[in-house]
Image (cartoon, rainbow, N blue to C red):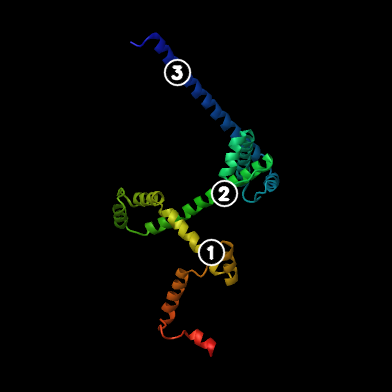
Amino acid sequence: KPKKGKKADMVDALLENESRRKQELELKQQLEEAEANKRKELKNMSVDELKKSLSKKGLEAAGKKDDMVEALYQAGIQEEIVAARKAKLRAMASDDFKKLLASNGLFAGKKEDIIEAVLAHEAKLVEAVKAYEVKIEEVLAKMKEELEAKTANDLKDLCANKNLKLGAGKEGRIETLLEDAKASGEVDRAITALARKAREDQLLAMEAGEVLKLCEEVQTDPLVKEVLVERLLAHEADFGRVPADEEPKAKRGRRA
């Protein structure tokens, strides 16, 4: 039989756990009530008031009333997060603050200015993550569309080739393949390829002088051998190969 002391400890532990759970439940209820009250407060505002509040925060004042209420509510949450983060940064020890600056590639200065710089930097990172998540959804949507065009047997073969669970239905196999595409890095590679193609199109649309200037800024030689070989092969594919003992037509034309 357990000793009386151990039993008392067990009882104390149980009571402590119950007290903690009760506190957590009460806190959750308080947060839910605060959220409901805030939403109710925003819903009681007129459309004009909502538009003015959105404009003051630099947000788009358009859409249905419920959409504007939600936009204002989310903006309020974001402001609370920023305020909490700002308070945490102000309270950081000097050494920890310096390490944070170094890890983000920021320079020392007035603490308030640095805090604003850190917040701006972190906001950019958050936006970059959100933008990447949007691209992930776009790539997955395209993959899903392509997979939906395949037969159930084709999907089964794809799953088998990737050593994935075969599943029983077409939808299940599609979900399995999409999850594998995310986990294996296939989605990330597709996003990288799309970004590279978009950048390539952007550069090709620029004037030659602008591209050359960019090369100089990043200290890249545009006339590297690999590039010249690639261009020569592309030209030969279109116009045929020039014999080694014959001058190119363009060169003969210049001399004439």
Spatial CA distance of label 3 from label 1 is: 66 Å
Instruction: Name the foreground residue: 44 vs 253.
Output: 253
Residue receiving disc 1: 220
Q: 197 above or below 255?
A: above
- Name the spot of residue 192 as percent of width and height, x first: 47, 57
**Mark 3 vs mark 1: in front:** 1
- Relative side of 99 to 13, left or right: right
Q: In percent of the image, x 37 and y 59: which residue is there?
A: 149
Query: Of callouts 2 and 1, which one flags the residue occurring earlier in the amino acid sequence?
Result: 2
Exactly how many numbered labels are in the figure? 3
Query: Of callouts 3 and 2, which one flags the residue occurring earlier in the amino acid sequence?
Result: 3
Circle 2 crowding by C-alpha within 10 Å: few under 14, some 14–19, many from 20: few
- Name the spot of residue 62 as percent of width and height, x first: 64, 51
Q: Which mark is residue 13?
A: 3
**Mark 2 vs mark 1: in front:** 1
- Name the spot of residue 228 as percent of width and height, x first: 47, 72
What amino acid is found at the position of numbered circle 3 in the picture? Ala
Query: Of callouts 3 and 1, which one flags the residue occurring earlier in the amino acid sequence?
Result: 3
